[in-house]
Image: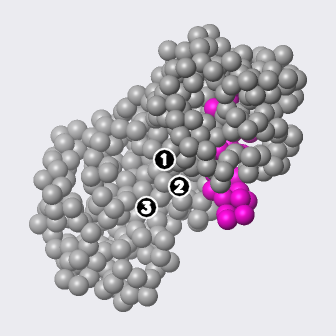
Amino acid sequence: MKTINDFNFENKRALIRVDFNVPMDENFNVTDTNRIEAAKPTIIKVLEDGGSVVLMSHLGRPKGQVVPELSLEHICSKVSEVLGVQVNFVASSVGEEAEKAASSLVSGQVLLLENLRFNAEEEKGGEAFAEQLSKLGDVYINDAFGTAHRAHASTTVVAKFFPENKCFGSLLAKEITAIDKVMETGEKPVTAILGGAKVSSKITIIENILDKVDHLIIGGGMTYTFVKAKGGQVGDSICEDDKMELALEILKQAKAKGVEVHIPVDVIAADDFSNTANTKIVDVDKIEAGWQGLDAGPKTLEIFKEVILKSKTILWNGPIGVFEMESFANGTISIGNNIAEATKNGAFSLVGGGDSVAAVKQFGFQDKVSYVSTGGGAMLESLEGKSLPGIAAIKA
């Protein structure tokens, strides 16, 4: 795996694909700089070597049209602030203007291109567009894990124009290593904690990880599909009736492979999907009509805690309850605390997937786990065992 540490960028211009698809308020102020900060180590390494940098990213979904509200010019000052380096902006991503701006860079300077998705060829993976991008740098670095599962011009196709001079940035290399630690080289016992609403969105992940894990903790809304499939009463809880057979098949496969599956035994049930609903603790398979399970119960959390604390490698994908409501956040917070404790005791922990990452940030766990993935879709596809085009292109 070639990374930025295999290159000296002195007098070289690095073309770096970053993921600066950041949230902004109505006045175009960046409200979360995490993605910019995540790319900083790669950019600074190039500059400290004595090179210059051309940054390319998308922002939003302009669908090949120029949408002024989605111009990367809005974030230029914030990127400068985070990097501690003045970042210049050019109002195009390819062509004469972009090439002139790139070629005039001297060591230590940074240029940010206009939103790649203002050009329809970016998402189509257009080869001519990729070739035009390739003229802007001497070395290509992909540091955008969030888009590594897309075969776009800037994430995949452009790499072929740098047969020897291409590598992974610091962030992307960390993502690959973290996933590899869980899926291939993780110290046993390996535990996967899968939450979220639906079994259907996690099927391929479950099927792919059954060969890798020793324990599988099921939480969140998909609990009730498993419980009902086993003959339990789930009341008004979310349930995919058409996936019950599949749930039983998963349990059968897990047993055959020697994987211990842990499903909640009790839950916090509510008489309404509301933070102010009446609640009670009930057995997971005895939820009455008019009530729905919205969080894991105390007995369940004790069982989960025991499993997590004896684990050496932990993957967490998906919340355990409706953590957005304070009344049903305890299960997710408890899991976070247990993972933090296991990590402190030497376990490797990887958190990935939109909602679990949001929970980790909301409850302040990001510095208490080993790694928090920056790419939702890319992370999930990696766990499903799929080859990501953006990663394959660098390895080719």
Decide if residue 49 is on the left or right side of residue 168.
right
Label 1 crowd (10 A; few <14 / some 14-19 / many >=20) = some
Q: Which mark is residue 319?
A: 3
Write down the residue under mark 2.
357
Q: Given the image, on which type of amino acid does mark 1 rest?
A: Gly
State the SS at label 1.
helix
The residue that label 1 is drawn on is: 376
Looking at the image, tell me whether mark 1 or mark 2 is earlier in sequence order. 2
Residue 253: mark = none
Label 1 – label 2 distance at C-alpha? 9 Å
What amino acid is labelled 3 in the image? Pro
Please report the residue visible at 72 percent of the width from the left and 63 percent of the height from the top.
27
Viewer-side residue, 116 vs 389: 116
- Report the mark closest to the observer, 1 or 2: 1
Measured along the vertical axis of the image, is residue 30 above or below residue 56?
below
Q: Secondary structure at mark 2?
A: helix
Q: Which residues are magenta?
A: 14-40
Report the quarter where the N terminus lies: top right
